[in-house]
Image (cartoon, grey):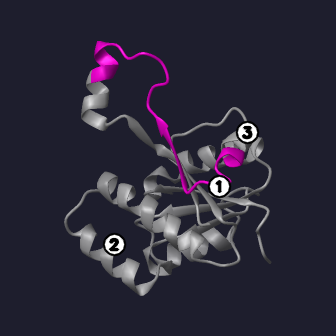
Amino acid sequence: MIYKNYTNVFTVCTYSYLNLALVAMKSFTENNHTSRNFIFVIDAGFEAISYLNNHNISRSLEIIFFGVDQLSKNYKSIFTKASSYFDSMELCSLAKYIGTDHILSSIENSNLCTYIDADTFFLSSIKKSLEFLKDKSLLVTPHYVEPAYTKSQLLCLRSGWINSGFLIFNRE
């Protein structure tokens, strides 16, 4: 089946944070009814991914789970090497970009891919964001959309002003 009228949405987590990722996906799908859903479980082996995909673990959310074993040979090699240097948090940061390319490299998927952090909760649709992105390659969001004060300024100095917990990529 071709999913061109859908937006791909995905998150990244470790196996121990899978429940949090499922809540994020549920809130997204309840507010955005045309999505193809993916979760990249960075520490799940082939058997665990097969179990997740074959036992309705996502409770009718129609989520496609994938792990390192489902990546291309090149990305599998990069991720495996990175695993010996980086902790889970850093690997999840790498995984959001590898996962985006993994999803967008499939011709059957839509040209749009939305990344959401596993601790994100949606209260409304992202339709306006998707419409804005029609002729653009990437949508990034700031941490703050109002004047920053001392505490939040310090956070921006430490974390940067771009929130990489919500990104939309356009393959076109």
Amino acid type, label 2 = Phe
* Residue 73, horizontal then vertical, whole percent: 41, 86
Dot 3: what SS?
Answer: loop
Q: Residue at x 59, y 66 (%)?
A: 171
Q: In the visual, does 67 lie left or right of 125?
A: left
Give the magenta-colored segment's residue range: 130-153
Q: Residue furthest left?
A: 85
* Along the viewing direction, whichever of 47 and 99 lies nearer the viewer: 99
Amino acid type, label 3 = Ser
Amino acid type, label 1 = Asp
Category of crowding for the residue at label 1, using alpha-carbon neighbours closer than 10 angstroms: few (below 14), some (14–19), many (at least 20): few
Which residue is under mark 3? 125
Q: CA distance from mark 2 to mark 3?
A: 33 Å
Q: Is residue 146 magenta?
A: yes
* Along the viewing direction, whichever of 52 and 118 lies nearer the viewer: 118
Which residue is under mark 2? 79
